[in-house]
Image (cartoon, grey):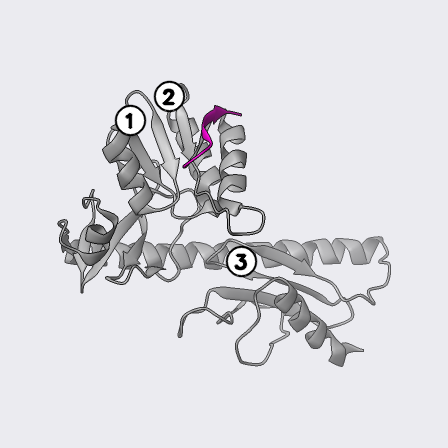
Amino acid sequence: MTAFYPDGFRNALAVAGLTMLKGELIADGALHRYQIEGDKAGSKNGWYVLHTDAQPFGAFGSWKTGQSETWFPASSAAMNEGERKAMAARIAAAKLARDTEQAAVYAAARQRAQGLWEKAKPADGGHAYLIKKAVPAYGLKLLRQQLVVPLRDVEGTLHSLQFIGVDGRKTFLTGGRKRGCYHAIGRPEAALCICEGYATGATIYQTTGNATAVAFDAGNLQAVAKALRQKFPRLPLVIAADNDTETPGNPGVTAAQAAARAVGGALAVPSFAGVAHV
């Protein structure tokens, strides 16, 4: 049966949306990194730990999204107390390996981000993306024709960078932390708005004068909102949703609603929903 375990593990990777692009699985209980199908060439955002001995077990995930999963073969038999303790130790070891490697990945990305940020020049409003969106360059830099948007935590530490090309294509620094990080526009006074993208944040600031935190995507809204709520416990927070009406489930509004509930904030939905407390 052992020979079939890697196939089951590969299937688990695929079901989770973390398919390994190429390479053989190494079932030695150590952490291995790999390129996830669909990621940019050369990146190794995927990680896994795999055992295929008498107690098969696997763990895997993505540094890019923060996703983390565990796997057991469908044929796994019930374990006795000793086996359960051994498996618990195996799971704990996999988590420690993941956390240790992730810390190293984040540290390396912080160093690269700082070097690129220092190398980049201050941006002005002449970049094609800014002209198209009719917004200024609030705290942005320019590097090889790409706008550079910093991702910082609530303490102001630079963790990663977003790059925006002249065609509007957006990419992030490989391995950089995104969760809970944001780009701040303006100084918080009467209220603080939180949104997904830079152009939206710049437009909100231009229109309302309220400070805005750019969370970069819907999946990061709640993490940023919670971090800012802890930093500003009494400041009114407004979660400005992307209204993804053409996407099933409207993920922009759904994520914004969850973020607003999590911090007792207000929800703003463009065009027709206005502002409502949740």
Vertical comparison of 108 with 199: above or below: below
Secondary structure under the numbered disc 2 in the rendered image: loop
Residue 98 circle label: 3
Depth check: 1 or 22 in front?
22
* Contact (Cβ within 8 Å) of mark 2 with mark 3: no
Please indicate, yes or no, whether residue 227 appears anywhere in the rendered image: no
Local packing at callout 1 (Cα closer than 10 Å; few below 14, some 14-19, many 20+) is some
The alpha-carbon separation of the residues under discs 3 and 1 comes to 36 Å
Which contiguous range is marked in magenta?
A: 270-278
| Contact (Cβ within 8 Å) of mark 1 with mark 2 | yes
SS for callout 3 = helix
Q: What x and y, as percent, mark residue 68?
A: 58, 55
Give the side of residue 86 with respect to residue 233, left or right: right
Give the label, 2 or 3, closer to the camera. 2
* Kind of residue at badge 3: Arg
Mark drawn on residue 188 = 1
Which residue corresponds to mark 2?
Answer: 235
Give me the C-alpha separation between circle 2 and circle 3.
Answer: 36 Å
Which amino acid type is marked by label 2?
Leu
